[in-house]
Image (cartoon, rainbow, N blue to C red):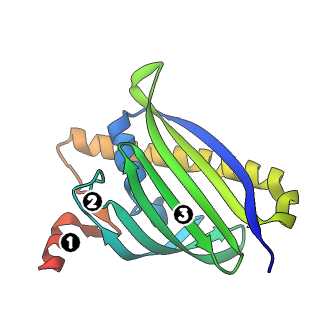
Amino acid sequence: MINKKKLLTVVCKNRSSYNRDFVWENAQDLEHLPTLHRSTNSDIKLLHHVKTDGLGLVYDELVFSAKRRFGILTFRSFGVRRIVTDYKLVQIESFPRLGIQYRLTSGVEEDPQDCGKSILSDQVEIFWFSFCKILRPLLKKRIQLHARRQNQEDESYRERRADLKQRGLNIPFSILNKTLFEEFFEIR
């Protein structure tokens, strides 16, 4: 059996024009992935979720599956996402066919230069076979590019949500097309 080792750790920091609370709400949302980031995400399925009196808006922990695209190839993944503290979540995802696991620690900080803005900090740790270390430079570059692109796409999403809020339209937070209202009646 070939052992998997931590192959790489990449830290990506991206600025947002929006405040910490607004960006944190967006960071917890899996709903926007298959629509806003459809070039790399599709068919996200909620397998289980837990909501206690914890820190999450709608959930404290999610178990999900998703189709992720890498270039022209698509792979099914399985993951767990947990809110661990205020403004911080951890996601662990596995790609069984590739033998890859990764851990994403994502946090939102106030921008020290402008308290009305924020910084999204993502630490990605890749676990893979040790003989794949030759791919480290390529993986690092692709992860940084991916984080930068997703942040740019998220900024337009945040802008739209901010515009709707200013007009008095507050779209309810949801888990994969299920609003809190629907979740409530599904439990009954």
* Mark 2 element type: loop
Q: Mark 1 sits on what residue?
A: 183
Amino acid type shown at disc 3: Ile
**In this image, 82 relative to 94: left or right?**
left
Depth check, front residue: 3 or 148: 3
What residue is drawn where x is 31% and y is 41%?
Answer: 162
Q: Earlier in the sequence, mark 3 or mark 1?
A: 3
Q: Is residue 108 above or below residue 53?
A: above
Q: Earlier in the sequence, mark 2 or mark 1?
A: 2
Amino acid type shown at disc 2: Val
Q: Is residue 119 above or below residue 153?
A: above
**In this image, 132 relative to 146: left or right?**
right
- Disc 2 + disc 1, Cβ < 8 Å: yes
* Mark 1 element type: helix
Q: CA distance from mark 3 to mark 1?
A: 25 Å
**In this image, 10 relative to 120: left or right?**
right
Amino acid type shown at disc 1: Glu
Q: Which mark is nearer the camera, 3 or 2?
A: 3
Residue 45, numbered label: none
Q: Mark 3 sits on what residue?
A: 92
Rendered location of residue 71, percent (x, y)? 72, 67
Label 3 crowd (10 A; few <14 / some 14-19 / many >=20): some
